[in-house]
Image (cartoon, rainbow, N blue to C red):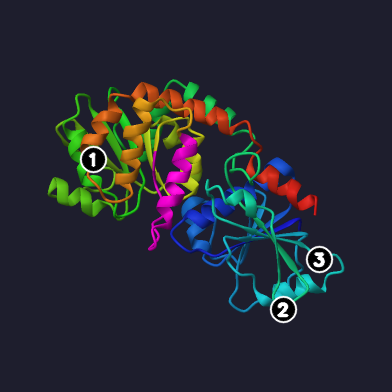
């Protein structure tokens, strides 16, 4: 194999989502042979309905997906070994790496960050504490001195073709089992449980235009229940004032990309959906993964500072306040009204931001070049 990618599921679908996208891109864009090792393969089955988590190994879209066994037997290591997000390789595998005449290039793929210190540590080397092996740190990020972000070569072609189809919104909503409200402002909401959703529901209900909110089934339903006074069912649309809220089923990665493309604003969380929303060229609100020491707020604002460099001040200030309050459980209802009045500016900036990102090589291309150079 060219690549072995190891992924330990830490929280929900983010780690698997990033690892799976990377594996697919290495195969399809770079002609690599890839094994993806998952300790909880059933999680991938939610993102890829064609995947059977009961099989020990399965070829899926050209990637050999394997169950990461508790009791590890000998496996011939790949030329390049990706340890996703510091997941710790099995010791028998490490010893097999050590036994090879030409030792594999061992990469620790870190989490995405726009913080300034990332460029100083990207590509850094860490010797193993007890074995004659070394590991390189590869940091995804924004700009020319870090690892980049994931983007397939044909993503923009797919997005353009989908949006140019006259019935794209109607067909996707029909696929979700939801009635299409043609004149409505469409919002997709994917966030963590503690997001202040109720304050937004009130703002959308009193909006001057119809607002159709698509909310995936999950933990946020209890907030919807407390605000509406009853529990919405899957694929049901409930309304109050100008707010129309539909609970949509869990979807594959490809379908989620399409949802991001058709929505007027995307609320996203974590890392995978955050990156995909940027490639949608639509306005986004990021709910970052919370950390007990509030380190996530530094990470959040480091990105916003970069994201807003070319943003008009009349949009940047209310958007900054919204991001901060959305991530600290503040009241964002009145802040939404300010953003709604600046929607054209926000949409224009989102397209400009995507154009800026496209000037840099993507993560998979940078990773392949980095590995081959070593």
In x, y percent, where is residue 323? Answer: 35, 42
Which of the two labelled residues, at mark 1 and mark 3, occupies the earlier sequence position? 3
Image point (74%, 45%), residue name: 31
Residue 130, which numbered label? 2
> Which of the numbered marks, if any, corresponds to residue 200?
1
Q: Which residues are magenta?
A: 285-307
Give the labeled residue for mark 3.
103
- Horizontally, residue 258 falls left or right of residue 239, namely right
In the rendered image, residue 197, in percent from the top left (x then y), is placed at 25, 46
Q: Which mark is residue 119?
A: none
In the displayed structure image, the side of residue 291 where residue 143 appears, left or right = right
Q: Was residue 52 drawn as part of the magenta stretch in this picture?
A: no
Tell me what residue is drawn at x 27 percent, y 50 percent.
329
| Cα–Cα gap, marks 2 and 3 | 16 Å
SS under mark 3: loop
Classify 331 as above or below 187: below
Q: Which of labels 2 and 3 is toward the front?
A: 2
The 10 Å Cα crowd at callout 1, few under 14, some 14 to 19, many 20 or more, is some
Closer to us: 69 or 357 = 357
- Where residue 173 sits, quadrant-wise, is top left
Q: Tell me which numbered mark, 2 or 1, is placed earlier along the sequence.
A: 2
């Amino acid at each position: 194999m060219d690549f072995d990618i190891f992924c330990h599921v830490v929280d929900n679908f983010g780690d698997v989502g990033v690892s799976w996208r990377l594996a697919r891109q290495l195969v399809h864009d770079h002609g690599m042979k890839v094994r993806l090792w998952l300790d909880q393969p059933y999680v991938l089955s939610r993102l890829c309905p064609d995947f059977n988590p009961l099989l020990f190994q399965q070829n899926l879209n050209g990637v050999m997906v394997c169950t990461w066994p508790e009791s590890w037997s000998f496996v011939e290591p790949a030329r390049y070994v990706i340890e996703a997000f510091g997941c710790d390789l099995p010791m028998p595998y490490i010893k097999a790496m050590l036994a090879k005449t030409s030792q594999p290039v061992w990469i620790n793929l870190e989490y995405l960050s726009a913080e300034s210190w990332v460029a100083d540590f990207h590509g850094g080397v860490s010797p193993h504490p007890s074995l004659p092996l070394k590991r390189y740190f590869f940091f995804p990020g924004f700009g020319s001195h870090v690892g980049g972000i994931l983007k397939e070569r044909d993503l923009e072609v797919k997005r353009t073709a989908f949006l140019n189809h006259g019935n794209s919104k109607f067909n996707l909503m029909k696929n979700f089992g939801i009635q299409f409200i043609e004149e409505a402002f469409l919002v997709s909401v994917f966030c963590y449980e503690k997001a202040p959703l109720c304050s937004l529901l009130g703002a959308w209900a009193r909006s001057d235009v119809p607002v159709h909110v698509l909310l995936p089934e999950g933990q946020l339903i209890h907030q919807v229940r407390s605000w509406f006074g009853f529990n919405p069912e899957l694929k049901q649309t409930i309304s109050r004032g100008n707010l129309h809220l539909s609970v949509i089923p869990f979807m594959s990665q490809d379908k989620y990309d399409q949802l991001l493309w058709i929505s007027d604003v995307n609320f996203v969380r974590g890392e995978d959906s955050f990156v995909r929303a940027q490639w949608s060229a639509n306005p986004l609100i990021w709910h970052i993964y919370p950390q007990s020491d509030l380190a996530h707020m530094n990470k959040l604002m480091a990105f916003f500072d970069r994201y807003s460099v070319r943003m008009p001040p009349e949009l940047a200030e209310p958007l900054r306040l919204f991001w901060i309050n959305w991530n600290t459980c503040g009241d964002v209802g009145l802040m939404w009204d300010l953003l709604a009045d600046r929607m054209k500016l926000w949409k224009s900036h989102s397209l400009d931001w995507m154009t800026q990102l496209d000037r840099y090589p993507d993560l998979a291309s940078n990773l392949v070049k980095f590995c081959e150079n070593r």
